[in-house]
Image: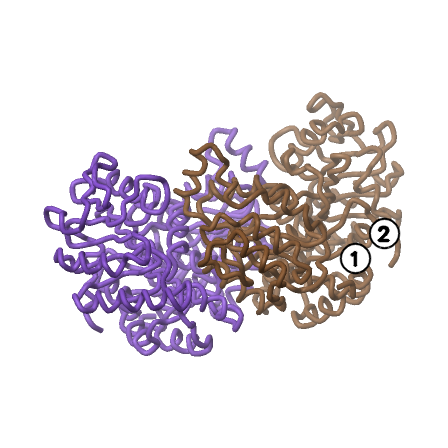
Chain colours: A brown, B purple
Amino acid sequence: MKDSNLRPFFEPQGVALVGARRSPGFGYGIPVVMKHLGWGNRLRLVNPSGGTLHGLPLYKRVADIPGRVDLAVIIVPARAVPEVLTEVAARGIRHAIIESAGFAEVGEKGLKLQDRSRRVAQKHGIRVIGPNCVGVVNTANRFTTVEILDEALAPGPTSIIAQSGVFGTIMLDMLYQYRLHISKAVTLGNRMDVNECDALAFLKSDTNTRVIMMYLEGAADGVRLRDTLAEVTRDKPVLVLKSGRTEAGRSATASHTGSLSGENKIYDAVFAQTGTVRASTLEELVEMARVFSTQTRPPGNRLGIVTSSGSLGVMATDTAISSGLSLPSLSRHTVGRVREGAPGWMNVRNPLDVGPSGQYGEALAALLEDPGVDMVLAITVVPFVVFKEIGRQGLPGTSYFGDIASIQELAPRKPLVVCAVGNNDFVSQMREASGPEVPVFISPEPAVRALAALYRYWAWRGEV
Amino acid sequence: MKDSNLRPFFEPQGVALVGARRSPGFGYGIPVVMKHLGWGNRLRLVNPSGGTLHGLPLYKRVADIPGRVDLAVIIVPARAVPEVLTEVAARGIRHAIIESAGFAEVGEKGLKLQDRSRRVAQKHGIRVIGPNCVGVVNTANRFTTVEILDEALAPGPTSIIAQSGVFGTIMLDMLYQYRLHISKAVTLGNRMDVNECDALAFLKSDTNTRVIMMYLEGAADGVRLRDTLAEVTRDKPVLVLKSGRTEAGRSATASHTGSLSGENKIYDAVFAQTGTVRASTLEELVEMARVFSTQTRPPGNRLGIVTSSGSLGVMATDTAISSGLSLPSLSRHTVGRVREGAPGWMNVRNPLDVGPSGQYGEALAALLEDPGVDMVLAITVVPFVVFKEIGRQGLPGTSYFGDIASIQELAPRKPLVVCAVGNNDFVSQMREASGPEVPVFISPEPAVRALAALYRYWAWRGEV
């Protein structure tokens, strides 16, 4: 796996923004965001008109830029890109992000322009991300070429590779609201040079990245993708949403980012061989990333379920069995421990339906500490009026389920996921109560599927 | 299909609440809710202590109750139920909801008590819902034996049959937040008498019910269920979540509501034969109910997709093809119409990726009016900063996508579903903008799956 030499994209010393605009539109907001994030004195804006913008000087040509600059962010119209790349090279810059659209994705003419741009870049040894992308995000140094909210820059262990710029942007817009925080993000666009393999190799060596999530329409280089995945997944889980599963989907893809996405079965085989975790839907990608980024390697596939609703326990059990998890019997010790405080009607088994016994926290702790249980799903359900009544009596309504964030610490080496079903107010209070390390789902099946994927990944690594 | 004679459960003239409690706990809140909803002067509370509660007299015995009473809601401890049923019969009451738990679901002893109670009820011709349930809701007259929020009583076309009381309650707690409003709900519990077939037959004749959603762990009577479903689905869609798909799930079920849930394959066959729509997960049940309750019969299976993100268009296309929908080519007229205002780079096809062309509303209208398109998925995606910038300029950010609620009126006979992916603020504003008749999903696959289920149901009825 070759060193992909992408670091300057994420940690530039100085940035030339070529095509900064005075009026609203693409290229208008990026310098505002960069300046706001503290990059003002490392940012050089280029626009032939000269003058100033956002309090920064506008340089007429790339050649005019003073100081150390090792990254160019190019947002000029597509037809001007080859020339800009020549100027960038002349200025000694060896990394460029081309955000401009109008290349291979728009047809023959655009493809020619893209080829010309590639030749210029290759001739001068410029590494290029794009075109037709929004570039990168690095939360560690708060560097971004994507216009995003401050909240999206809260650092986390997950990095994102997205073929599409819009897709990458909306992921960044929403993921923090699921408490899924990011280390780095890169949108690849038409992949004139840097592709998903380069990005994977780079993120493999990135110490801030523990989990990689990737959206792919088609591989730039299938053989290299397989080899790269095989190496990366030995170190870090890679979660992939690969679209274009159907012929119609593939044909829709072809016109979008200018790639042909290849055969679905081959991808399935490649992902299976390389221990890559394939998500079948967008939701599943996000769900799995939430579990992989917070939960540890499970000791095995034995799932314990504690629930306050028998029905949801059954749904979770169905999904567990279909996904390759097992539901072990509880140890004699655990059964005795739970029975101690339990009312007579409570059936002490797995799934453990505690009903309205008030024993939820106890039961959860007992399951987590049972040596025959490798991971736990805690299904929290309570009629909303009961929840509110507890609140009126001066306790947090979530106290009904024990102090989940603390109970989790009893077994820090076992994955724990919460499923809270009901009114939104209840769910958001359960999110608070579960703390940042325990993901909360709003229905049981996705929670179980994500746990099963976590197990399968570690089993593939031979570490379970 | 026999007349199930359930109307007094939902439209009682007068209600005896047997087991009203003075202190917090089960039976404390129900009279408060009923009184709050205007049932105070039709409500008689029974408790041996006498005195008053919530400003209402407490009658010591059922026999003491004055006035017209045709429904008893029983919340006394399980062991007292047979005697209460005798008293209820003596008072001339012929409908009883037994909310008390402690019957078949707790084992042999409870089962005996349940059998004894059944014999008493049968002897006196009392129809019983329960035990181990929370009874019913009717939004039309605001009658409820379930403690729920006022918001959950907003009337709608969907009725719910739930085997489990807790499950029914949390559905009522949450569904209104998805704009899924209810006509009636019934929780069956241990089904000592009234079962899902009675409930289905009743809801078939209920003019306020257009869609039935049902949660089932096992059929009370398989043959009758098949026959009942076959009749009901000719009139109204029935959406079923049947858990206990796996052996482990079934065994978890057996201890929960005291039923054996039977074989999964048989259920699959019964549902397929009878045009019953089976949901595979809780989420899917809710998603399908949202589409079935708002969307009309589609003229065919041809899906038009308009999107501002190519990637999400591809995901939707994949799901459409896998679910049995087709993606037709657009008519020459539609292509011409869309091209008129479109920039050169825009590829006018299906899925129709309008990108940042500003042509979203136009394109959506053109697709809806294309005679070769039977239903439309509108995927709305925009970087959140752009959305906010539009808002700052004085227009609603949602204007980027045209006036969806009005555009929908162009083709009132074609289903239209919106998928809004991104920041929660964006999604909730899209919900507002789409109006009450256009469901908004937060990822493309569930939206498409629900449309496909809608098509399959109407195709099964032979009306497509």
Label 1 near label 2: C-beta < 8 Å? yes
B414 to A93, vertically: above or below? below
Q: From the viewer's side, name the closer residue of B66 and B217.
A: B66
Counting from the top left corner in percent of width and height, residue A232 is at: 80, 58
* Chain containing the residue with disc 2: A
Considering the image in quadrants, where does the N terminus of chain A appear?
bottom right
Circle 2 residues within 10 Å: few <14, some 14–19, many ≥20:
some
- Res. A196 image quadrant: bottom right
Label 1: which secondary element? helix
Residue under the image location 87 percent in, 36 percent down = A91
Q: Which residue is mark 2?
A: A4
Q: From the viewer's side, name the closer residue of B192 and A321.
A: B192
Q: From the viewer's side, name the closer residue of B397 and A110.
A: B397
- Res. A65 image quadrant: top right
Cα separation, mark 2 vs mark 1, equals 9 Å
Label 2: which secondary element? loop
Counting from the top left corner in percent of width and height, residue A167 is at: 62, 49
Q: Indicate left or right for A244 with B179 as reference.
A: right
Q: Amino acid under label 2?
A: Ser
Residue under the image location 44 percent in, 59 percent down = A345
Q: Which residue is mark 1?
A: A197
Residue under the image location 37 percent in, 70 percent down = B276
Q: Amino acid under label 1?
A: Cys
Circle 1 residues within 10 Å: few <14, some 14–19, many ≥20:
many
